[in-house]
Amino acid sequence: MKEMKYQQVGDYEFPVLKGEESLPKLTRFGRIYLKHLKENYKVHYLALLAENKLNDELLSMDKQINDRYDVLLKQLMEKRNINEELKENDQMKWVQEINNIKNIVEKIIIKDLG
C-alpha cells in the first residue's frame, strides 16, 4: 500500500492528493505577477492551480512583461537621447540616466499590473 503524505496547515494536517508541480524559474517580474495573482485575483490563481495551468500562465506573463520592459526601456533611451556616445563622454551621467529610466519603466509595469 502506498504511504499517504500530509501537509500541515495551522493545527490541521491535510492529505496531499496529487504531487504539486514546482514553480518554474521566474524573473523578478514573474515573481511580482505571481504575488499579484495571489493577493488580488485569488479565484483565478486557484483555478489555474487546480487546472494545472499556473506554470504556463506564469511563464507566458513573465515573457510578456520582460518583453514590454525591454521595449519601454529602449523607447525611453531614444527619447532621452541616451546612447553610446554619452556613455563614452560622461559615464556617470549615463549611469544616472539609465538607472532613472529603469526605475520609471519598473514603476510603469508594476502600475499596469494593478
Image: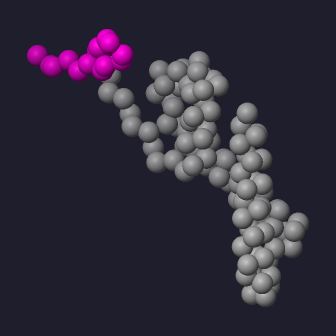
Start and end of the magenta stretch?
1-15
* Nearer to us in this view, 31 or 74: 31
* Nearer to us in this view, 90 or 112: 90
| Residue 85 against residue 70 in the figure, above or below | below
* Identity of the residue drawn at 77% across and 47% down: 108
The spot of residue 26 in percent (x, y) is 51, 47
| Residue 51 against residue 75 in the figure, above or below | above
Residue 71 shows in the view: no
| Left or right position of 91 against 58 | right
Residue 61 shows in the view: yes
Where the C terminus falls, by quadrant? top right
Q: How is the image coloured?
A: one colour
* Nearer to us in this view, 81 or 17: 81
Locate residue 45: give its quadrant: top right
* Identity of the residue drawn at 38% across and 33% down: 21
Q: Indicate yes or no whether the magenta region holds residue 3.
A: yes
Kindly give the residue lying farthest to the bottom in the view shown.
89
Q: Indicate yes or no whether the magenta region holds residue 70.
A: no
The spot of residue 103 in percent (x, y) is 73, 56
The spot of residue 53 in percent (x, y) is 51, 30
* Identity of the residue drawn at 76% across and 39% down: 112
| Left or right position of 21 against 66 | left
Where the N terminus falls, by quadrant? top left
| Residue 108 against residue 86 in the figure, above or below | above
| Left or right position of 50 against 20 | right
All told, the count of numbered labels is: 0
* Identity of the residue drawn at 71% across and 51% down: 106
Locate residue 67: give its quadrant: bottom right
Locate residue 75: give its quadrant: bottom right
The spot of residue 71 in percent (x, y) is 75, 58
